[in-house]
Amino acid sequence: MGQLNVYVPDDLEEKIKKEAQREGKSVSSFVLEAVKNKIEPKRWSKEFLATFGSVSDDFPDDIKDLPPQERDFSAL
């Protein structure tokens, strides 16, 4: 597995540490998951589908099924 050194502002470092601790993960695991979800989005969560997937019968099963112009990864 490769290793990267990433520099972030102090305030972002504190937020990352707090969120990782809240989720019971190491900082490395937390950052890895966040980056992986950004680059390789997972399928829609059950909670998301329960709320938004019931709106339309033609809702895509996977975020990758959306045309690129309709993908919004900013929230990931």
Image (cartoon, rainbow, N blue to C red):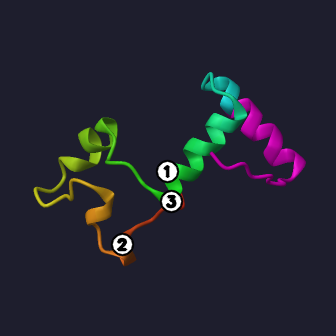
Relative image position of residue 50 (x, y in whole percent): 25, 39
Q: Which residue is mark 1?
A: 37
With respect to residue 50, does 24 lie above or below?
above
User: In the rendered image, which quarter contains the N terminus?
Assistant: top right
Residue projecting furthest to the bottom: 69
Image point 89% across, 47% down: which residue?
A: 10
SS category of the residue bearing label 3? helix
Task: Name which residue type carries label 3.
Answer: Ile
Residue projecting furthest to the right: 10
Specify the quadrant of the image occupied by residue 15. top right
Residue 11: in magenta span: yes
Task: Name which residue type carries label 1.
Answer: Asn
Task: Name which residue type carries label 2.
Answer: Glu
Q: Which residue is mark 3?
A: 39
Residue at mark 2 to residue at mark 1: CA–CA distance = 17 Å
Contact between marks 3 and 1 (CB within 8 A): the answer is yes
Residue 26 vs residue 75: left or right? right
Question: First in sequence: mark 2 or mark 3?
Answer: 3
Relative image position of residue 48 (x, y in whole percent): 33, 43
What is the number of the mark on residue 49? Answer: none
Residue 76 vs residue 68: left or right? right
Residue projecting furthest to the left: 57
Contact between marks 2 and 1 (CB within 8 A): the answer is no
Residues shaded magenta: 1-19
Residue 5: in magenta span: yes
Mark 2, mark 3: which one is toward the viewer?
A: 3
SS category of the residue bearing label 2? helix
Residue at mark 3 to residue at mark 1: CA–CA distance = 6 Å
SS category of the residue bearing label 1? helix
Seen from the viewer's position, the closer of residues 53 and 21 is 21
Seen from the viewer's position, the closer of residues 73 and 1 is 1
